[in-house]
Image (cartoon, rainbow, N blue to C red):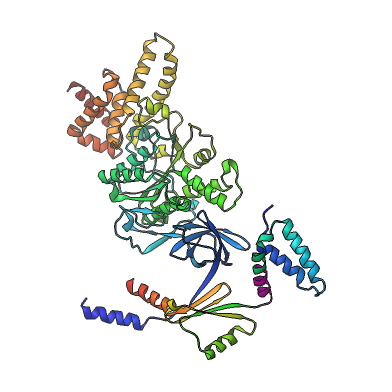
């Protein structure tokens, strides 16, 4: 049989715990840890927790948004962006001077690139060809 | 164009430049090693799609699984680490194709590695393409002269055929292929030589030889050397045939040599095992037959309505200790339209090319032979078959009846005639004359060891004084008149 992946454990844990009352939780977690031990997965616990967090966020409809800009964004713009992605999304800001200008937004697995760097690169390719 | 114009043009270009927001799908590397990367995300990734890794390294998506994508890396992978971003390119892996590639040495991705300037082509062809269908094909009818007497006479190859060259190491497999490429000079053929897993020194020697013979003017060399990653060896033949298809689409005849497919199968086995595909016989994955059949099906001869053109494939397979019943040799033998068998024994007995006439066949090439060759060589194969039988028998018997003795002596002379040094292809009309002479007993009074010398003299004589007859033969004409003329010429030669 194929080895089970971290994600599979995380999913299983999510399915089991999602409708559980608080009183049952400690016992379930204990059982889960025992299963991990049986599968020699204890040392992967950190990764499973990470996957669990990602997965539960996804299931709850929370979007992971990463905004990359060259300089720090104005609060007004940031608030506007927050409105677009909804209250539930988790926004992290990254500052990367290499972008030169513009903005790059990553939502889950999609990247919207409107940075100056990319525009310049495209312009360069257009002029060369 | 004046400077001002250029400036204006540039200004216009810049003014009309549209700002675009690029939408990309990205994934994350979760595991990397041995030229393999596992990537999470990329939910919409296609099979065979190019993936862009950091540092301009590309990967090829091979395994699409529930949560991850397994891909091979086409290039340096030392700097790629866990957590790196991987972009989709929405492109199936393609290689540049075009006339600019002719005379160049490129790697599996079409990048020049001969130290020359960069190759800029406008067209790109996907490396994986479905082979032409039944309705677009035509039977093989035009010969592809190899310039090797033994092959052109007894195992003829037609344009659009797939003929396997098989044998142990050091039996002259590559030599047959290279001689064939050299012989295509002036025959309106484009040649693609794909070297897979070969020593770089050997490739350098081959390229030098092709240059010396003037064959690089119509040849593309695709190299995935022994030191390049397995992924490049795996895609090299597909890249080569994609380049060939461009010329076929232009209505040209192309010759594709894959040297050799057993190494490609090894590379594919390596990739498959690393991607954890279940191993089968000899640890090859289950689809190793399809690996070669889909490649060799792309060799074809297309009819006029579909644009014409042809791709002739000469795959090479290296056997271990003459074992043709191993997995890969049996597979490729069953896919191709015949095989040329080269044997170590014959090679060391000085019969070069070390062709085993008995078990070498060409299933479709006979239709492509020119008429004179068909007439004179029909007898040849029979004589050789009888000779082999008698020879084995005669080893035990001391005295033989004159008829048998004659047959054996004829056989020895034919064997001697079919010997041929490397890099010296013979034109088809000269082949016909030589075989005609030995078949009709004109060389019976020449000692066996002097046959090749006598043949050389005959060739010189014919080239000098009977050029018009040779031209007729080369054009495929053959009737009683030409036959008598040929007989007279031979008699004339014997007198000289």
Question: What x and y, as percent, mark residue B150?
Answer: 36, 32
First to last magenta residue range:
A51-60
Instruction: Locate the C terminus of chain B and report the quarter of the image it occupies.
Output: top left
At x 21%, y 36%, the residue is: B468
The vertical placement of B123 against A90, above or below, is above
Q: Is residue B244 left or right of residue B269?
A: left
Residue B487 visible from this viewpoint: no
Question: What x and y, as percent, mark residue B242?
Answer: 42, 55
Observer-nearest residue: B38 or B235?
B38
Q: Is residue B40 left or right of residue A18?
A: left
The chief SS type of the magenta part is: helix
Q: Residue furthest top?
A: B399
Q: Is residue A10 left or right of residue B32?
A: right
Q: Residue furthest bottom?
A: A76
Question: What x and y, as percent, mark residue B101?
Answer: 33, 56
Q: Residue furthest front?
A: A43
Question: What x and y, as percent, mark residue B384?
Answer: 40, 24
Observer-nearest residue: A101 or B472?
A101
Residue B355, quarter of the rendered image: top left
At x 59%, y 83%, the residue is: A85
Q: Is residue B161 left or right of residue A25?
A: left
At x 34%, y 41%, the residue is: B178
Residue A53 among magenta residues: yes
Residue B298 among magenta residues: no
Observer-nearest residue: B90 or B153?
B90
Residue A4 visible from this viewpoint: yes
Instruction: Locate the N terminus of chain B and report the quarter of the image it occupies.
Output: bottom left
At x 43%, y 43%, the residue is: B260
């Amino acid at each position: 049989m194929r080895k089970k992946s971290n994600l599979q454990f995380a999913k299983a844990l999510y399915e089991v715990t999602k409708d559980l009352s608080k009183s049952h939780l400690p016992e379930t977690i204990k059982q889960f840890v025992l299963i991990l031990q049986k599968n020699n997965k204890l040392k992967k616990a950190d990764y499973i927790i990470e996957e669990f967090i990602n997965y539960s966020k996804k299931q709850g409809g929370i979007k992971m948004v990463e905004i990359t800009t060259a300089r720090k964004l104005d609060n007004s713009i940031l608030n506007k962006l927050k409105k677009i992605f909804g209250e539930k999304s988790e926004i992290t800001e990254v500052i990367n001077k290499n972008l030169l200008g513009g903005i790059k937004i990553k939502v889950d697995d999609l990247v919207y690139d409107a940075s100056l760097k990319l525009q310049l690169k495209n312009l360069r390719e257009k002029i060369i060809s | 164009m004046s400077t001002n114009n250029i400036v204006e043009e540039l200004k216009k270009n810049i003014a009309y430049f549209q700002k675009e927001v690029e939408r990309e799908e990205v994934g994350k590397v979760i595991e990397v090693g041995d030229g393999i990367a596992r990537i999470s995300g990329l939910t919409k990734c296609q099979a065979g799609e190019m993936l862009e890794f950091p540092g301009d390294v590309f990967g090829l998506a091979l395994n699409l699984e529930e949560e991850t994508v397994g891909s091979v890396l086409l290039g340096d992978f030392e700097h790629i680490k866990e957590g790196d971003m991987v972009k989709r390119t929405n492109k199936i892996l393609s290689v540049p194709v075009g006339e600019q590639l002719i005379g160049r040495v490129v790697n599996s991705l079409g990048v020049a590695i001969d130290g020359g300037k960069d190759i800029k082509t406008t067209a790109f062809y996907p490396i994986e393409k479905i082979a032409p269908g039944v309705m677009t094909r035509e039977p093989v009818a035009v010969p592809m002269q190899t310039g090797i007497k033994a092959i052109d006479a007894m195992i003829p190859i037609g344009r659009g055929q797939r003929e396997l060259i098989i044998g142990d190491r050091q039996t002259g497999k590559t030599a047959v292929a290279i001689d064939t490429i050299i012989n295509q000079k002036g025959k309106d053929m484009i040649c693609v030589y794909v070297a897979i897993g070969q020593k770089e020194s050997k490739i350098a020697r081959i390229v030098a030889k092709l240059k010396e013979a003037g064959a690089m003017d119509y040849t593309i060399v695709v190299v995935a050397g022994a030191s390049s990653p397995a992924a490049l060896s795996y895609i090299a033949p597909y890249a080569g045939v994609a380049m060939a298809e461009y010329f076929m689409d232009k209505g040209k005849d192309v010759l594709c040599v894959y040297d050799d497919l057993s190494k490609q199968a090894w590379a594919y086995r390596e990739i498959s095992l690393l991607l954890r595909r279940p191993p089968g016989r000899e640890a090859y994955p289950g689809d190793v037959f399809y690996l070669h059949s889909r490649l060799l099906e792309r060799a074809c001869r297309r009819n006029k309505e579909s644009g014409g053109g042809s791709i002739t494939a000469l795959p090479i397979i290296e056997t271990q200790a003459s074992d043709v019943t191993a997995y890969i040799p049996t597979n490729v033998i069953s896919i191709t339209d015949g095989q040329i068998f080269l044997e170590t024994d014959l090679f060391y007995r000085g019969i070069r090319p070390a062709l085993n006439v008995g078990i070498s066949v060409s299933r479709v090439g006979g239709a492509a032979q020119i008429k004179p060759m068909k007439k004179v060589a029909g007898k040849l194969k029979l004589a050789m078959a009888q000779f082999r039988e008698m020879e084995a028998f005669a080893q035990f018997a001391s005295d033989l009846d004159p008829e048998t003795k004659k047959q054996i002596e004829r056989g020895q002379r034919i064997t001697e005639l079919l010997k041929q040094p490397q890099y010296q292809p013979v034109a088809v009309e000269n082949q016909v004359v030589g075989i005609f002479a030995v078949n009709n007993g004109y060389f019976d009074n020449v000692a066996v060891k002097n046959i090749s010398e006598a043949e050389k003299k005959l060739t010189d004589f014919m080239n000098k004084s009977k050029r018009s007859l040779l031209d007729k033969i080369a054009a495929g004409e053959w009737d009683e008149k030409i036959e008598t003329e040929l007989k007279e010429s031979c008699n004339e030669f014997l007198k000289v």
